[in-house]
Amino acid sequence: MIKNDLANLLERKANFSRSKAVLTVETILETMKKALLAGEKIEIRGFGSFRVMPKKTGFGRDIRRNRQIPISGGRRVKFRPGQDFKKQLKQQSIE
Amino acid sequence: MIKNDLANLLERKANFSRSKAVLTVETILETMKKALLAGEKIEIRGFGSFRVMPKKTGFGRDIRRNRQIPISGGRRVKFRPGQDFKKQLKQQSIE
DNA sequence: CCGTTGATGATCAAGAATGACCTGGCCAAC
DNA sequence: GTTGGCCAGGTCATTCTTGATCATCAACGG
């Protein structure tokens, strides 16, 4: 699924024009991105939640030089599916 | 940030009615959820990608009984921020 | 609609960190 | 007001992480 698919969906389901559909998708995603960058968490019942967490991993590995690489900190975005979502993920009844 | 915030955003930025804004947000998220449940990956350039991966973790830990607990498999949803997103996350210049 | 562009995934390794289990409380979402 | 998601805590296995490169494909322009 790509951005186009979401836009198509809005065209069909919500009767949006193509440009409006694309813009809407981008607006939502951009906003979520900015919220996360601001350190805010996103929590949508029935879907899941995004949280920004400080990265504790301090070392990576460069296999070419076989040496450890110090990772200068940072943050991670963690996504956790909601309850229902998680439950459905466990059920492999889909296929 | 909650669903309401995203809806408010569409009301202001896209001039949507409240109900349409909420419905739009839900439609998009629901669709993404269903795609993931179907095993499909979602890839939005500039934002990030969601992928469903088989869960290899086979054992958890019950500290109360101090025993291993078999985790009956399943799938995980992994979110990876895009390049730009990741770069900005590293910069802690926000605070 | 096709071609171009450039982001993204996979890969290797090894080590560090996170996840998952459960239970209860608290607070947020609905 | 009610439901339910998150946190914490212990422990261990799984997974993530880093970097460079190529192939692939999403995104966009013509």
Image (tube, coloured by chain):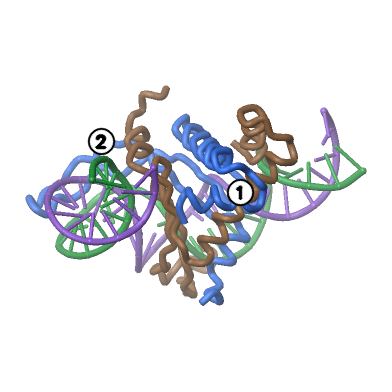
Chain colours: A brown, B blue, C purple, D green
Mark 2, residue position = B72
Residue at position x 7%, y 50% from top?
Answer: B65
| Pointer 1 or 2: first along the chain | 1
User: What type is the residue that disc 1 sits on?
Assistant: Glu
Q: Is residue A94 left or right of residue A30?
A: left
Q: Is residue C22 left or right of residue A58?
A: left
- Residue A73 in the image, given as x and y percentages of width and height: 46, 73
User: What type is the residue that disc 2 sits on?
Assistant: Ser
For residue A61, which numbered disc appears in the image? none
Residue neighbourhood size for the residue with mark 1, other residues' Cα within 10 Å, grouped as few (<14), some (14–19), many (≥20): some
Mark 1, residue position = B11
Q: Is residue B53 left or right of residue B44?
A: left
Corner quadrant of residue A85: top left
Q: Dots 1 and 2: beta carbons under 8 Å?
A: no
Does the image show residue B41? no
Corner quadrant of residue A4: top right
Residue at position x 59%, y 36% from top?
Answer: A1
Residue neighbourhood size for the residue with mark 2, other residues' Cα within 10 Å, grouped as few (<14), some (14–19), many (≥20): few
- The subunit carrying tag 2 is B
SS for tag 1?
helix
SS for tag 2?
loop
Residue at position x 61%, y 48% from top?
Answer: B10
Q: Is residue C30 above or below residue A90?
A: below
- Residue A87 in the image, given as x and y percentages of width and height: 32, 35
